[in-house]
Amino acid sequence: MSTQPITQGRVETADILKAAAALGILGGTAQAGRRLLAMLCNPTITAAEIAAAIDREPGMAARVLRVANSAFYGLTRKVSTIDRALMLLGLNAVRGIAAAACLDRAVPQGKDVPQIDVASLLRHSVAVAAAASELARLRKPELVSEAFIAGLLHDYGVLVQLRVDPPGLLAFERQMRSTPDGRASELEVQHVKVTHDHCASVIFEQWQLPASLVASARHHHHPDEAPEPHAEIAALVHIADHLGRAAELGFAYEPAAEPVSRAAMAVLGVTDEDLGLVGAELPDRVQALQQSLSGA
C-alpha cells in the first residue's frame, strides 16, 4: 500500500475518502464499530439493545467489563455481565465506555500509518470527552452520552489529514513552534490544503453517524457556525477542547489553549465556576480513564 500523499491540486471529498480507505477506516473491517457508534448516539435506544449489540462482539464486551471494574468508576461490587454493567453504571456510562473502545480500535496501526504521536492524540481525545460529558452533566444532562462520544471523536480527522497533506502539516507544525502564542486553528488554515475538522465531517457523514457528531467535529473551533439544532453539542466540545489544552492535555497540532468562546458558554449556561471545577478535576479523571482503557 502506497504512502504517497494525495496533495495534487485541490483536495476533494474523493481524496479524503481515498485516504481514509487506505488507512483502513472505511470498508467492511470498520463496519461493526461504525454501526455501534451510531447506535450509541440514538437517544431512543434501549439498554437491552445496547447490551445485545455489545455482547455480539466478545472483544468489545471484554473492554466494557474491564473499564466498568476499573478505578475510574470506583465500584465495590464486581461487574461480570453487560446487563449488570448497565444496571450499576447506567446507560450513559456504558455508551461512553463502548465509544472509547470503538475509537481505540479504529486508530490505524502498522507501517503505512502516517507518523503522529497517537498516544498524545488519544489522551487529548479522552480529556475532551471527559470534560464535555462533565460539562453536560452540570448544564445539559440529556447530552452527557453524546458529549462524551463527540469529544472523543472531535480530532479524528487528523489521522486522515496527515495522509492527505503531510507537507502542509509539517509546515503548520513548524509555524506553531516559531509562534507559540499563535492560534492553532488560524495557523492550520494558512498552511494546510484541508483542515482536520473538514476531514472528520466527511468521514462521519460517510459512516452515517448522527448529524450532531458531524456538526461538532466540523465546528468545534467555531461553535457559533454550527447549525442551530447542534449548537449545544458543538459548544460543549469547543469548551471541553479549551479545558483539555489548558490542563496541558493537548497534542502536537493543538498544543496550547485558545480563548474560550463566551458565546458558547452562554448557549449552555456554563459559568467560569463550572470551568474551574471541571478543569481542576480533569487530569485525575483522564489518568484514571486512560489506565482503565489500557488495562493498567
Image (tube, grey):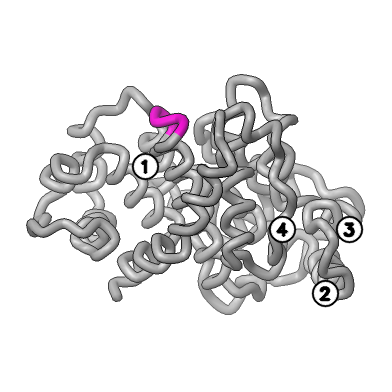
Q: Nearer the viewer, mark 3 or mark 4?
A: 4
Label 3 or label 1, whichever comes before in sequence order: 3
In the structure shown, which secondary structural element does the residue marked by tag 1 occupy? helix
Magenta-colored span: 139-143
Q: Is residue 169 left or right of residue 32?
A: right
Q: Which mark is residue 122?
A: none
51 or 78: nearer the viewer: 78
Three-letter amino acid code of the residue under disc 1: Leu
Write down the residue under mark 1. Answer: 36
Q: Residue at x 51, y 65 (%)?
A: 123
Q: Residue at x 23, y 39 (%)?
A: 90
Three-letter amino acid code of the residue under disc 3: Gln
x%, y% of residue 155?
61, 53
Q: Nearer the viewer, mark 2 or mark 1?
A: 2
Label 2 or label 1, whichever comes before in sequence order: 1
The answer to whether residue 58 shows anywhere in this view is no
Label 3 or label 4, whichever comes before in sequence order: 3
As measured in the structure, the alpha-carbon distance from the residue carrying label 4 to the one carrying label 2 is: 19 Å
Q: Are marks 3 and 1 in contact (CB under 8 Å)?
A: no
Write down the residue under mark 3. Answer: 8
In the structure shown, which secondary structural element does the residue marked by tag 4 occupy? helix
Near mark 4 (Cα within 10 A), the count class, few <14, some 14-19 or many ≥20, is: many
Q: Is residue 155 left or right of residue 177?
A: left
Write down the residue under mark 2. Answer: 177
Picture quadrant where residue 103 is located: bottom left
144 or 168: nearer the viewer: 144
x%, y% of residue 218?
68, 40
Label 2 or label 3, whichever comes before in sequence order: 3
